[in-house]
Amino acid sequence: MNRDIEKVLFTKQQIEERLAELGAQLAEEYHGKKPLCICILKGAVPFLSALIQQIEIPLEIDFMSVTSYGSSAKSSGVVRIMKDLDISIEGRHVLIVEDIIDTGLTLRHLVDLLEQRNPASVKTVALLDKSICRTADIEANYVGFEVPNEFIVGFGLDYDEQYRNLPYIGVLKKEVYHIG
Ligand code: 5GP
Ligand code: MG
Ligand code: MG
């Protein structure tokens, strides 16, 4: 295990098992609808990659990169698009694929933004849900795991761009980000 990790919350195997369940549910929901799975860069890349292999129906993927306005410490919820989608979502069934929902401000704004583009539907799947921190009025339609109010890294989630490549999900030791 990486020495900066305090504890592992979900192992590679636990993640794989959960994503197989989620994939089966999503295949049922989107059967015959050829959904467009929108991966929110960069944190959701490993999640998207593993999840779509478990959704055994025709689908498409695209990528979007967003950032919050204002100070980096606090999410303002007003998102700025750094990289927009390559294709139109008009009439499409859209599934937003996110790494983690914390306050929910980012996802709330993203859903509102995409709904203005006349898709057939917009739903969301998040690998992790820190629901205790929610301030915005939004819940993901599908969630991998509920997590406690701690700083989580691994399986796409970073601290200062590090730890995205860990194959498990864990809690970062406090001394790592306090001394930084
Ligand atoms: P929200 O707008 O829901 O507060 O912000 C969600 C974003 O904050 C996530 O996409 C992620 O980038 C970041 N975030 C929130 N909690 C954590 C966490 O525990 N670990 C990491 N690595 N990022 C987090
Ligand atoms: Mg994210
Ligand atoms: Mg980050």
Image (cartoon, grey):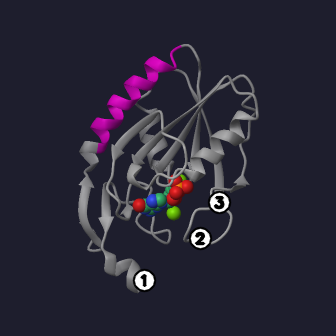
Q: Earlier in the sequence, mark 2 or mark 3?
A: 3
Q: Which residues are magenta?
A: 15-31
Query: Pointer 1: residues within 10 angstroms few (<14), some, or many (20+)?
Result: few
Q: Does the rendering let one see residue 45?
A: yes
Q: Is residue 178 above or below residue 114?
A: below
Q: Is residue 23 above or below residue 143?
A: above
Q: Is residue 74 above or below residue 122?
A: below
At x 76%, y 33%, the residue is 117
The C terminus appears in which quarter of the rendering?
bottom left
Which residue type does callout 2 highlight?
Answer: Ser
For mark 2, what is the residue? 72
- The residue that disc 3 covers is 67
Which amino acid type corresponds to the residue marked 3 in the rendered image?
A: Thr
Q: How far is disc 1 from disc 3 in space, using C-alphas?
A: 22 Å
- Marks 2 and 1: in contact by CB < 8 Å? no
Which numbered disc, 1 or 2, marks the residue that appears first in the sequence?
2
Q: Is residue 30 magenta?
A: yes
Q: Position of residue 172 (x, y in %)?
A: 33, 69
Q: Which residue is mark 1?
A: 180
As for residue 16 lying within the magenta part, the answer is yes
Depth order, front residue of 82/71: 71
- The residue at the point 35 percent across, 60 percent down is 149
Q: Residue at x 47, y 50 (%)?
A: 101
Label 2 environment density (alpha carbons within 10 Å; few <14, some 14–19, many ≥20) = few
Crowding at dot 3, Cα within 10 Å, few <14 / some 14-19 / many 20+, comes out as: some
Left or right, 126 with reference to 72:
left
Residue 138 is situated, as x and y percent measured from the top left of the image, at: 53, 41
The N terminus: image quadrant? bottom left
Of the image marks 1 and 3, the number of the one nearer the N terminus: 3
Q: Tell me residue 41's x, y (percent).
A: 58, 52
Which residue in the rendered view is the most extreme toward the top? 32
| Residue type highlighted by circle 1 | Gly
